[in-house]
Every structure is written in structure tokens, then in C-alpha cells.
Image: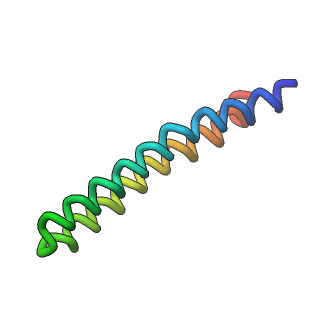
Amino acid sequence: MTGSLAYIGYGLAAIGPGIGIGLLVGKTQEATARQPEIAGRLFTNMIIGAALAEALGLIGFVLPFIVR
């Protein structure tokens, strides 16, 4: 039963980074539409932010196996 709970916990932990990355990409697209000349700098910042948000999802995936 604890294995099943770990997978449910990972599913819940993946919701936050998914929403965060979605908002990040959406706002970057909006900013690029407003000022196309800074698209390169925005893209770089977006990739760094997405990597940080994805790291939270990976921690949520690994943590139930470590604590177990």
C-alpha cells in the first residue's frame, strides 16, 4: 500500500511544476509579443526558470523512494 501512496504523492507533486511551467511559457510568449527585440533574453530566462520548476518535480518523484 505504501508504494501506491508514493505514486499518488508524486502525481500531486507534479501538479505544481506543471502549472508553473505553463504560466512561465505563457507569460514569456506574451512578453515576446509585446517586445520582440528582447525575445532572446526572455528565452534564456524562461529555460532557467523551467529547469528550476522541473527540479521540484524530480525531487517530488525521488523523495517517496528515499523516505520509504
Q: Residue furthest right?
A: 1
Q: Quadrant of residue 60?
A: top right
Q: At 14% across and 64% down in the image, what residue appears? A: 34
Q: At 41% across and 44% down in the image, what residue appears? A: 20
Q: At 58% across and 41% down in the image, what residue appears? A: 14
Eyeballing the image, is 9 above or below 31? above
Render colour scheme: rainbow
Eyeballing the image, is 16 above or below 5? below
Q: Is residue 30 left or right of residue 7?
A: left
Q: Position of residue 55 (x, y in %)?
A: 49, 48
Q: At 21% across and 66% down in the image, what residue appears? A: 32
Q: Is residue 32 left or right of residue 51?
A: left
Eyeballing the image, is 6 above or below 51? above
Q: Quadrant of residue 62?
A: top right
Q: Position of residue 64 (x, y in %)?
A: 69, 33
| Image quarter hosting the C terminus | top right
Q: Is residue 50 left or right of residue 64?
A: left
The tally of labels here is 0
Q: Position of residue 23 (x, y in %)?
A: 36, 48
Q: Position of residue 53 (x, y in %)?
A: 43, 47
Eyeballing the image, is 39 above or below 55? below
Q: Is residue 21 left or right of residue 5?
A: left
Judging depth in this view, the residue of 7 and 31 nearest the camera is 31
| Image quarter hosting the N terminus | top right
